[in-house]
């Protein structure tokens, strides 16, 4: 069974476009280097505080692919830059999901 993941990033004031550009580059690396990444799509939303978030909807082939992603050099470098670069208001909110109902497609 595939593993859905949602990751929410809240850019610092004035950093939204810079974060989008950087995360698009990161998504390209994931696409090129991680065959277990089946979907890695970025969206924009306005959160409850009126700030714009970046929301990733991810689909991984299995939990091993998720764990391998977190061990890649590009992921570790991104986490380091995010923590020290002032680009985000805080750490990414990453949720690994398990389906409990509803349906997938028609």
Image (cartoon, grey):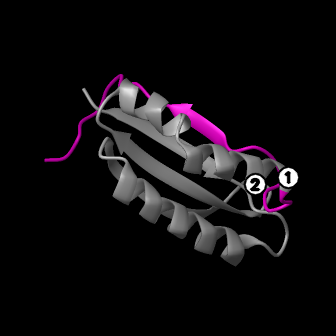
Q: Position of residue 68 (x, y in %)?
A: 45, 32
Query: Which element type, helix, strand or loop, lies under badge 1?
Result: helix
Q: Where is residue 79 in the image (x, y as percent from the top left)?
A: 69, 46
Quadrant of the image occupied by residue 63: top left
Query: Image check: 11 left or right of 104?
Result: right
Query: Image check: 18 left or right of 13?
Result: left
Query: Image check: 69 left or right of 105?
Result: right
- Residue at x-position 79% and y-position 57%: 88
Q: Is residue 23 above or below residue 81?
A: below
Q: Where is residue 53 in the image (x, y as percent from the top left)?
A: 67, 60
Label number found at residue 81: 2
Label number found at residue 84: 1
Looking at the rendered structure, the number of numbered marks drawn on it comes to 2
Badge 2, how many Cα within 10 Å: few under 14, some, many 20+? few
Q: Position of residue 46 (x, y in %)?
A: 67, 63
Check the image and name the residue furthest to the front.
73
Badge 1, how many Cα within 10 Å: few under 14, some, many 20+? few
Task: Residue 6: say if magenta.
Answer: no
Q: CA–CA distance between discs 2 and 1?
A: 5 Å
Magenta-highlighted stretch: main secondary structure? Answer: loop
Check the image and name the residue furthest to the left.
106
- Residue at x-position 85% and y-position 52%: 84
Q: Is residue 78 above or below residue 18?
A: above
- Quick one: 3 or 83, which is closer to the camera? 83
- Residue at x-position 29% and y-position 35%: 61
The stretch in magenta equals 85-106
Circle 2/circle 1 CB separation < 8 Å: yes
Label number found at residue 61: none
Task: Residue 98: say if magenta.
Answer: yes
């Amino acid at each position: 069974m595939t593993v859905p993941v949602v990751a929410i990033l809240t850019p610092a004031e004035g950093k939204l476009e810079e974060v989008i550009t950087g995360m698009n580059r990161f998504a390209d690396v994931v696409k090129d280097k991680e065959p277990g990444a089946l979907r890695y799509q970025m969206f924009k939303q306005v959160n409850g505080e009126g700030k714009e978030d970046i929301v990733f909807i991810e689909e991984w082939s299995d939990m091993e692919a998720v764990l391998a992603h977190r061990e890649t050099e590009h992921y570790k470098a991104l986490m380091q830059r995010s923590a020290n670069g002032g680009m985000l208001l805080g750490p990414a909110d990453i949720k690994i999901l398990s389906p409990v109902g509803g349906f997938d497609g028609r």
